[in-house]
Amino acid sequence: MTPRTLLRPLALALALAAGSGAAFADGDIYSRLMEMREMDRNKDGMVSKEEFLAMIAKAWDMHAQENKLRDGKLNAEQVKSLEKLLGRTLSAQASL
């Protein structure tokens, strides 16, 4: 993967984090996925770029599975849906 390919999900997630959104219920899988303790895989108290991108990749895979994708691609509507999920979740985490 090129650095440009890796930075696109990060840029999307950061842009979504800047937006506003309603908090999810405590049991929401996307909310739990984006908790610090879930992202910090090596438990050093920090989230590396690799750990953050792994979380975004996992969210993508979960959304693709929910939408029963066979080709691994999201259409425009599915991308908007994922953006809403991640935006609300990241916004809720930032307010904690």
Image: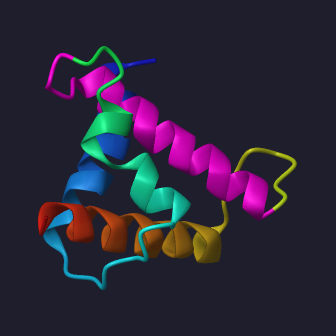
Magenta-colored span: 44-67
Question: What residue is drawn where x is 20% and y is 81%?
Answer: 20
Q: Nearer the viewer, residue 62 or 46?
A: 46
Vertical order, 59 against 16 (above or below): above
Q: In which quarter of the image is the C terminus?
A: bottom left
User: Could you tell me if residue 4 is visible in this image?
Assistant: no
**Along the horizontal axis of the image, is 9 left or right of 74?**
left
Query: What colour scheme was applied to this rendering of the protein?
Result: rainbow
Vertical order, 19 against 52 (above or below): below
User: Could you tell me if residue 14 is visible in this image?
Assistant: yes
Residue 60 lies within the magenta run: yes
Residue 75, picture quadrant? bottom right
Which residue in the rendered view is the most extreme toward the bottom?
A: 22
Residue 51 lies within the magenta run: yes
Location of residue 63 in the rendering, given as x and y in whole percent from the top left corner: 64, 58
Q: Nearer the viewer, residue 1 or 61?
A: 61
Considering the whole magenta stretch, tell me its main secondary structure.
helix
Location of residue 4 in the rendering, given as x and y in whole percent from the top left corner: 31, 30
**Along the horizontal axis of the image, is 60 left or right of 40?**
right
Report the number of numbered marks: 0
**Along the horizontal axis of the image, is 51 left or right of 68?**
left
Which residue in the rendered view is the most extreme toward the front?
A: 26
Question: What residue is drawn where x is 31% and y is 55%?
Answer: 12
Q: Nearer the viewer, residue 33 or 55?
A: 33
Question: What residue is drawn where x is 55% and y is 66%?
Answer: 79
Residue 69, picture quadrant? bottom right
Question: What residue is drawn where x is 22% and y is 69%?
Answer: 91
Location of residue 52 in the rendering, given as x and y in whole percent from the top left corner: 31, 34
Vertical order, 55 against 19 (above or below): above
